[in-house]
Image (cartoon, rainbow, N blue to C red):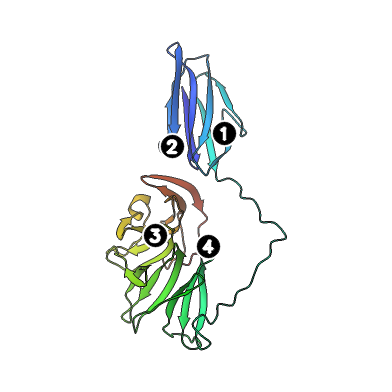
Amino acid sequence: MLLVSINWGQGSIHAEGIFGGAPSTATCSGMRNACQLHFDEGTSAKLRADPDPGWVLDSWDGACSGAEGCSIHISGHQQVTARFKPPVQPKPPLNIVFDAVDVSHLDGPSSVTYAQVLDDTGAIAGGICDAPVRYGMACDFFLWDGALHRFHVPDGSTAGVGATAGGRVAGAIRTASGVQSAFVTSGEQIVELPTLSGDSFAGSINASGVVGGASFTPSGELHAVVWKDGALEDLGARTGKTESIVQAIDESGKVSVLACDRFWRVTPSGCHALVMTGEAQVDLGTIPDGFLLTPR
């Protein structure tokens, strides 16, 4: 018997061997994590790693090693593990030249703007005020994509920008009474997003308009959530951890989640980095206790 496992990344293992005297094939996917494959004693099994799009094989472990092909002579119980990783991104050229654009007074010389986030197209978003910024001063927020789009924050409220993509801005608005709600812009409007009955904030968005962040539950737990087409999905309930937040969303819909036994207003502990796609999720491993985290 051969025990095949995938303990990091996304991909599958395709195996070929002899079972019952006849050629046999089997596939173990990352969604299953571990598979028991049965081949005839004394025969050989050939294993091929098939990374998902955007991933590559990192290494084999156990009965195989390295990052090449894997062939195993079946003798009793044996185990092999495949690890996948994102490909190494090329470094930018050393002679890259950056242009500086002054965006500190986008709405005229009397306005003050401060950039908070940037997307892949070069659009920026942040706060905008009609006077020099002072502590506690309520300001609007903006999106600048070559033209200025200004969003008025209701009087008595404050807004924080978490991310921008696809011509939208996501973040959180806090009212004078202290209630905080995640928002996303639609055209020139600010759309408040549904919550899990407690405060919420948004810190990521992709170009398709899927928003990620977190919301407090009625019991006070902080759960990672995503908003798609205005509907809320509780990802924190899937992590098995008490507290979690969405860190990022890519254009394919993969969601990066940080899930911990605890981290809100306490020393973080029991934290794992996860990648979620649909109903599947990959645990990227533990994060040392006590790391510094500042949720948006």
Q: Between marks 4 and 3, how big is the CA–CA gap?
A: 15 Å
Rendered location of residue 177, percent (x, y): 31, 80
- Tell me the amino acid under the disc marked 3: Gly
State the CA–CA distance, disc 2 to disc 4: 37 Å
Label 3, label 1: how far apart the Cα atoms are? 40 Å
Q: Secondary structure at mark 3?
A: loop
Q: Earlier in the sequence, mark 1 or mark 4?
A: 1
Q: Which residue is mark 4?
A: 121
Amino acid type assigned to the residue bearing label 4 in the image = Thr
Task: Tell me which residue sits at (35%, 55%) in the image.
Answer: 236
Left or right: 188, with 112 as reference point: left
Instruction: Identify the mark at residue 61; answer none if there is no mark.
Output: 1
Indicate which disc, 1 or 2, sits on the residue closer to the N terminus: 2
The residue to which callout 3 is attached is 209
Q: Earlier in the sequence, mark 4 or mark 3?
A: 4
Q: Which amino acid does the dot numbered 1 rest on?
A: Asp
Q: Residue at x 50, y 58 (%)?
A: 289
Q: Secondary structure at mark 2?
A: loop
Nearer the camera: disc 3 or disc 1: 3
Q: Quadrant of residue 194?
A: bottom left
